[in-house]
């Protein structure tokens, strides 16, 4: 079974037009994606934008065999101080202690060269939500995912914090002829597709 077949079997999708995403009929969440990663036997992944480590913990719980790289600079932005970010870094380290996790405290673009192309089963991108950063994350991380792996981009919504993410994902999927691609049905959706 291909990864696309596994996705389509797990989630119920309504119709869509070519080059637009599938949306599941019922609720589907990024937590469901974490479960799918485990069901597919994914053992190596990256989370770009770890913050407090909440979703990294979910990824690890869904797949005890996972070796997860958590990439986040924990640097000040949007009027947040370094002290503020260091607090979240410590939270993430505590939350992920004892798990097969490597913390990579770097800007996303600075961490990309540390990974070989095709070396990851998945990339879960939840970094800076401004268009330029989202696009640089896509351009940098997509080649790191092996064929049959999954690229996922969180906060694919038109709310203030996600509108640039939506624009970046549409631009990337169109420019790279990504079809099919999918979107979870939740308050803060995740767009995702199978790497080719």
Image: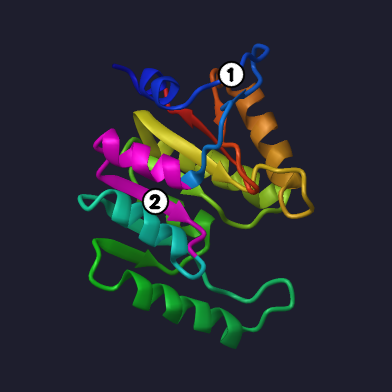
> Is residue 35 rendered magenta in the image?
yes
> Is residue 107 rendered magenta in the image?
no
Query: Where is 189 relative to 183, above or below?
Result: below
Residue assigned mark 1: 177
Residue drawn at x 22%, y 53% is: 64
Image location (x, y in percent) of residue 192: 52, 34
146 and 29: which is toward the camera = 29
Residue drawn at x 31%, y 64% is: 102
Image location (x, y in percent) of residue 51: 51, 67
Question: Would residue 121 be seen by someone viewing this image from the given angle?
Answer: no
Q: Secondary structure at mark 2?
A: strand
Quadrant into which the C terminus falls: top left
Specify few, some or many for label 1: CA neighbours under 10 Å numbering under 14, 14-19, or 20 or more.
few
Give the extent of the magenta segment.
Answer: 31-50
Residue drawn at x 44%, y 78% is: 91
Quadrant into which the N terminus falls: top left
17 and 175: which is toward the camera = 17
Q: CA distance from mark 2 to mark 1?
A: 23 Å
Residue assigned mark 2: 46
* Coloration of the structure image: rainbow
Query: Where is 90 relative to 172, above or below?
Result: below
Disc 2 and disc 1 in contact, CB within 8 angstroms: no
Query: Where is 94 relative to 23, above or below?
Result: below
Q: Earlier in the sequence, mark 2 or mark 1?
A: 2
In the rendering, which numbered label is found on residue 85? Answer: none
Question: Would residue 25 be seen by someone viewing this image from the given angle?
Answer: yes
Residue drawn at x 51%, y 43% is: 29
Residue 24 relative to residue 122: left or right:
right
Image location (x, y in percent) of residue 160: 79, 53
Specify few, some or many for label 2: CA neighbours under 10 Å numbering under 14, 14-19, or 20 or more.
many
Query: Where is 132 relative to 145, above or below?
Result: below
Q: Quadrant of residue 100?
A: bottom left
């Amino acid at each position: 079974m291909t990864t696309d077949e596994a996705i389509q079997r797990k989630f119920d999708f309504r119709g869509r037009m070519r080059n637009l995403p599938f949306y599941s009929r019922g609720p589907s969440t990024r937590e469901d994606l974490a479960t799918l990663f485990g069901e597919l036997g994914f053992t190596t992944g990256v989370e770009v934008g770890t913050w407090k480590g909440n979703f990294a913990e979910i990824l690890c719980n869904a797949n005890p065999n996972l070796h997860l790289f958590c990439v986040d600079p924990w640097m000040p932005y949007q009027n947040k101080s370094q002290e503020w970010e260091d607090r979240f870094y410590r939270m993430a380290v505590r939350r992920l202690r004892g798990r097969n996790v490597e913390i990579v405290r770097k800007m996303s673009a600075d961490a990309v060269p540390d990974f070989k192309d095709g070396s990851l089963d998945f990339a879960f991108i939840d970094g800076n939500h401004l268009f330029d950063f989202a696009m640089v994350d896509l351009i940098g991380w997509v080649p790191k995912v092996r064929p049959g792996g999954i690229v996922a981009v969180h906060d694919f919504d038109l709310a203030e914090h996600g509108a640039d993410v939506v624009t970046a994902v549409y631009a990337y999927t169109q420019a790279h002829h990504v079809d099919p691609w999918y979107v979870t049905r939740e308050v803060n959706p995740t767009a995702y597709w199978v790497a080719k």
